[in-house]
Amino acid sequence: MLLKKHFGYHTFKTGQKEVISSILSGNHTLAMLPTGTGKSLCYQLPGYVLEGHILIISPLLSLMQDQVEQLKKFGEKRVIALNSFLSVEEKRSVLTDLKNYKYIFISPEMLQLSYIIQRLQRLKISLFVVDEAHCISQWGYDFRPDYSKLGEIRKKLNDPVTLALTATATRKVRNDIIKSLELNEVAKIESSIDRPNIALHVEQISGYQEKENRVLNLIAKLKKPGIVYFSSKKAADHMALVLRKKTNLRVSAYHGGMDSNTRVLIQQQFIHGQLDVICATSAFGMGVNKENIRFIIHYHMPPQIESYLQEIGRAGRDGKPSVAILLYTPGDERLPLQLAEAELPTNLQIDWLFKIIFQEQIIGKKQLNPEWQELGGFSELQWRIVESFFSEPMQELDDLLSLKDTIQEFINERLEIKKQNIFLMKKFIESSKCRREFILQFFDETMVNKLHSCCDLCGDDIQAFYGNEVCGQSPSNEETWKDYLAKILINSELRE
Amino acid sequence: MQKLVSIILDCIKNINNERTIYSILHLLNGKKSSQTIQDAHLFSIKKYFGVYESLTRDSFERIIDEIANNQWIKPIEEQRYLLTPSGESYCKKNPVPPHLNGWKYYSMTKLFWERLSLFIQVTSNLVYKETKYIPIQKNKDIHTWVKACLVGTNISRQEIGNQIFHELLECLDQVDGIQPPVLVFRLTGYQQIGLTAEQTANKLKMDMIDYQLEFNNILHYMIKKISENEKNFPLLSFAVYDIKKANDLTNSTKKTWNLYRRGYSINRIAKERKLKVSTIEDHFVEIALNVKNFSIDEYVDKSQQEKILEVARQEQTRQLKQIKEMLGSVTYFQIRLVLAKYGERQWN
Ligand SMILES: Nc1ncnc2c1ncn2[C@@H]1O[C@H](COP(=O)(O)OP(=O)(O)OP(=O)(O)O)[C@@H](O)[C@H]1O
Ligand SMILES: [Mg+2]
Ligand SMILES: [Zn+2]
């Protein structure tokens, strides 16, 4: 059996079998399966059945890297990730023997490049996979403008069988995905987004200092390991420091401001049980497959229900009871609002940009100049949004006027949607009826049976998650550097 | 911060009021400008070149303020200081990491570390017969290099862990002026992930700045020790033997050098490259520093060279202005060329 042979698993997890047989019968498939239930396998396994190549579109570089490594760990060598990490030379050599790679991961940005498309057109793409497909939809929580062009690209690649994967998409978003990918007949395999072994708790905390104390208090008591999520890097760093100082737990921060080598180490330390607690931003999570995470604490509220679910979904992958605790202090919603505004270009920036563009057009330049990103003070994300609106060569003068309006409208609309999402998240926090039911309703599901350990509003007791078992071995301070070297380099069992 | 302070004090001592303190910042940052490279040689402080690349202007200025407040240095003019006797005794009490050799090794330090750490991880997993693990180095070139090493060695897979263990011990054990834990606890092996820089610094109760310096110190020590005794380190020497020091000239100077070799004059090079003549002169000074058989006779005649050196020696100065005042007829460019070409050899 392929599952055993290539992946070493004995049985399928929920939904996997259905999705895989749907693809293998040649159906476009939309699969919504909860976080951490093995969606990747749904395109990995068909690779050993289908002829031709599997093309996987993935929104995050780090995620892509993890998925490549996952496949390599299974002994699959024909894997490549096409993204901006590759040097020009590497890119050239990879592109010339692209046909030797079975699994091709690619970022949506790269798919916009015509020479890449031309290379791909020479291949037989037998499966077109859109991972984290909710990024396609404006209504999705992590909208990527480049994702919305995937329908066009599918056409250019000769309408391959398509698999859209997501863990969290409302009905509206799911419909958007199908429409945007221009799929006419789609098999939908949807399982409940509910994770019954994760209890949901929200606590109202009166102030900043109290919140810090509460985290200290909870972490001292809760079964570990666990993650504390923050919306700001600084807060994550600070809390990690406090925890290291005031407890004897092994704690590290993790966020996008750290260099990538450090991030890899911390992620691996956590997976190997060398850390009890990670204080992280949302940069931590995707691609982290750790079975035994016992708690997720939200120090700041996430900007929407979907990211909340995504983040608490890191817990309890082994199926054992776990807890999600969100700490809310009045006024906390200001932070996500600010962040939402900062992600989008400001009207001032757009005005500035178009002034320059008009000047350049007059002297006949028809390219978006990358230097303008820095000159106009556009962040990476802001610039990516702007870029996605321009064709190459640039639109004619007449069209540019209306383009400016289009962009500004888009920005305003995005902001409205984000505000709406934050508002809903706040409603969840303020809810007075069952929290699980609230979430299920949000995804147009209904609650079938009442759980024993459901949520704070159903009377679940947080003390059930207390416990003092230590996870992993603590570092002994006596270990000398020579002992350490001997431990990793000399396998004493082999000697006897 | 003690170690960084000692380094800065040592630089101030050697520069002896002839440059502003910012030349020290550029030096520690490893700025590849002609001026910085020149200064590094001129004042015999090249071992500090690039040993602290991430030092910011802000933190640097804060340190200067602090050591001025402590009266370890005294201000002479704006941005210029001299070492005081109490600064001198601070240096004696807190010696700088002795193996730092930035100018020679800074361009290969990172590569050496990446190779060493991946090699250890791969070996360790070989020893424990584990094939499924996440490599901690992402750089493809390093992976290719490790594979090539394993193919290239005739040491058996069973022995390889033992061998590298003993090589590391021989290299690191009982050596003055290095702290092996600074490096060793950062290594990743089978089911054991190495610490980050910050975690190691915490564990050893060092501050991050001194930790970085000690880390560079031990790496420079290892590169030197291994490359000078390749036979004793059959495995470790893989990590150094093909690392040639990157060409010493900065990129822009390289272009100037190529034109010069095609017989172009300074003025013509300036025109060709649309750069100021003074910039091209900077390049020539850099060339005089780095290219051994480059002759400056074309620009300064022999007798003038003698005179310049004579004055510099007598007056114990490397300050261009003083030399020029004494001699009158020479240009700054000529003085700099002579000091660049002969400076260090004469004074050390
Ligand atoms: N049939 C199976 N049996 C056992 N384990 C499995 C099976 N399929 C997948 N897994 C494991 O489940 C874990 C989660 O897989 P994967 O990363 O594909 O989840 P995901 O659904 O994509 O999660 P996310 O929502 O976080 O993206 C992995 O460690 C994978 O190896
Ligand atoms: Mg996934
Ligand atoms: Zn409930």
Image: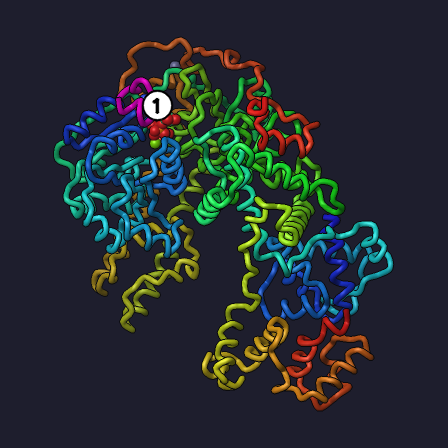
Find disc 1 in the rendering and name its residue: A8
Q: Please, is residue A190 above or below residue B194 in the view?
A: above
Q: Quadrant of the N terminus of chain A?
A: top left
**Residue B53 screen position, x and y as percent:** 60, 55
Q: Answer yes or no: is residue B346 visible.
A: yes
Q: Is residue A121 magenta?
A: no
Q: Residues within 10 Å of mark 1 (few under 14, many from 20)?
A: few
Q: Please, is residue A387 above or below residue B120 in the view?
A: below
Instruction: Describe the element under mark 1 as helix, strand or loop.
Output: loop
Of all chains, the one bearing label 1 is A
**Residue A266 screen position, x and y as percent:** 53, 35
* Residue type at tag 1: Gly
Residue at the far left: name it: A184
Q: Answer yes or no: is residue A328 visible.
A: no
Q: Is residue A14 magenta?
A: yes
Dominant SS type (magenta) = loop
Q: Which quadrant of the figure has residue B79?
A: bottom right
Q: Quadrant of the C terminus of chain A?
A: top right
**Residue B105 screen position, x and y as percent:** 62, 57
Residue plotted at (76% across, 65% down)? B14
Residue plotted at (43% across, 61% down)? A375
Dividing the image into four equal quarters, which quarter contains ligand 3? top left
* Mark 1 residue's CB less than 8 Å from ligand 1: no
Q: Looking at the image, which is closer to me, B139 or B153? A: B153
Residue plotted at (52% across, 45% down)? A259
**Residue B69 screen position, x and y as percent:** 79, 55
Residue plotted at (73% across, 58% down)? B8
Q: Please, is residue B90 above or below residue A475 in the view?
A: below
Residues drawn in magenta: A1-15
Q: Is residue B24 left or right of residue A86?
A: right
Q: Looking at the image, which is closer to me, A274 or B182? A: B182
Q: Looking at the image, which is closer to me, A128 or B215? A: B215
